[in-house]
Image: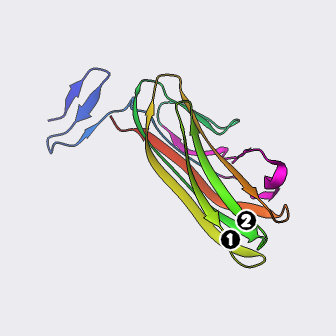
Amino acid sequence: MAATIPGKAIGDENGHVIFPLQSAFSAVRSATQSNLDINAGAQIVIDMATEIFDQNADYNTSTSTFTAPVTGRYQLNFYTYMADVDDDFAYLQLDLVTSNRQYNTIIENVGSEDGYDNISISVLADMDASDTAVVKIQGSGGADQLDLTQSGFSGYLAC
């Protein structure tokens, strides 16, 4: 027999419990983001405008931004596949930027001309209600030819 806690949790006789109002989202790129001008000295928002799911309507596809509905710890994940990576890049830096702090990972000397690479980041972020999270990229050196193809941004309220 299924058990419910009104507005909170649903469980079944096997002990499986779901929280239908728990924040969870997954979004991906709808098209390649081409020839990024990462040498401009500013972070560029990585566009992820196609939702796979958005359980609590907390992800904004027009700004590629997640907004925390409540204070808690959120598991946030991002990955991207990069094409046309110029061998003259000094570094590429991926930034997962929340209202409280910035998490980043860096690739130095990323490879050969027109090379390919992957970059990802996964964090358990402390977020307050109405804090935001967005993924950005920046770099130094090389031509403005970097393309981001297969990319995804996901997250959920962990505790």
Residue 31 in sight from this viewpoint: no
Residue nearest the observer in this picture, 136 or 106: 106
Name the mark on residue 90: 2
Report whether 99 appears left or right of 87: left
| 108 w.r.t. 65: above or below | below
| Label 2 element class | loop
Q: Residue 99, percent across and down? A: 56, 30
Q: Residue 2, percent across and down? A: 18, 34
Residue closest to the far bottom: 112
How dense is the environment of label 2, judged by Cα within 10 Å: few (below 14), some, or many (20 and up)?
some
Residue plotted at (73% across, 79% down): 112
Name the mark on residue 109: 1
Decide: marks 1, 2 in contact (CB < 8 A)?
A: yes
Considering the image in quadrants, where does the N terminus appear? top left
The span shown in magenta is 29-54
Number of marks present in the image shown = 2
Residue 130 in sight from this viewpoint: yes
* Location of residue 49 (image quadrant): top right
Report whether 134 appears left or right of 121: right
Residue plotted at (76% across, 62% down): 147
* Location of residue 143 (image quadrant): bottom right
Report whether 84 appears left or right of 102: right
Considering the image in quadrants, where does the C terminus appear? top left
